[in-house]
Image (cartoon, helix red, strand yellow):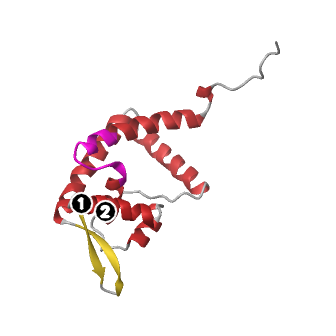
Amino acid sequence: MPKPPSASSLTDHLGFWLRMVSNQVSQAFAAKIEARGVTVAEWVLLRALYAAPPQSPSKLAGTMGLTKGAVTKLADRLIAKSLLQRRPDPDDARAQTLVLTPAGERLVPALAAIADENDRAFFGALTAAERKALEKTLRRLAGHHGKTPFPTS
């Protein structure tokens, strides 16, 4: 029986380690905010609208790197939760914009605090310089591959 060709170990790949850390960070964050009644995707949309003027679904889709249909579905869910509302676009009677409700405005800082704590829990083992270097490297890789930097705040 011929010997199979050699193959690098799974743990030899940076992608493996990135995925492992990303999954841990994302799953912990998702569990924490789902306890507050929102998903990670909904949080991203809420944060995109926080302290911002009303925006069209098309503009949000471009900013967030999603399709207009995906933004519409997220908006529908957030409207059902009374966290978002549609308003007529003052510049175009045929169009609508999305804006946070007062409940949505109150929820975003609480969710941001959860995100901040989640980051501290997972990245607290790094020095400030290591964390900054990691962020710079990840942003550089994302930019090199044409990925939008959103969300950044």
From the image, tell me which residue sits under label 1.
80
Percent position of residue 134, x then y: 49, 43
Secondary structure beneath dot 1 equals helix
Q: Are marks 2 and 1 in contact (CB under 8 Å)?
A: yes
Q: Amino acid at mark 1?
A: Ala
Secondary structure that dominates the magenta span? helix
Q: Is residue 25 left or right of residue 112?
A: right
Residue shown at the point (43%, 64%) measured from the top left: 69
Residue ID at (28%, 64%): 50
Q: Quadrant of residue 73?
A: bottom left
Query: Visible in this render: residue 129?
Result: yes
Residue 103 percent across, percent down from the top left: 17, 60
Q: Nearer the viewer, residue 39 or 94?
A: 94
Crowd band around label 1 with a 10 angstrom C-alpha radius: few (<14), some (14–19), many (20+):
few
Label 2 sits on residue: 76
Amino acid type assigned to the residue bearing label 2 in the image: Asp
The residue tagged with tag 2: helix, strand or loop?
helix
Between 119 and 82, the residue placed more toward the observer is 82
Residue 7 vs residue 104: left or right? right
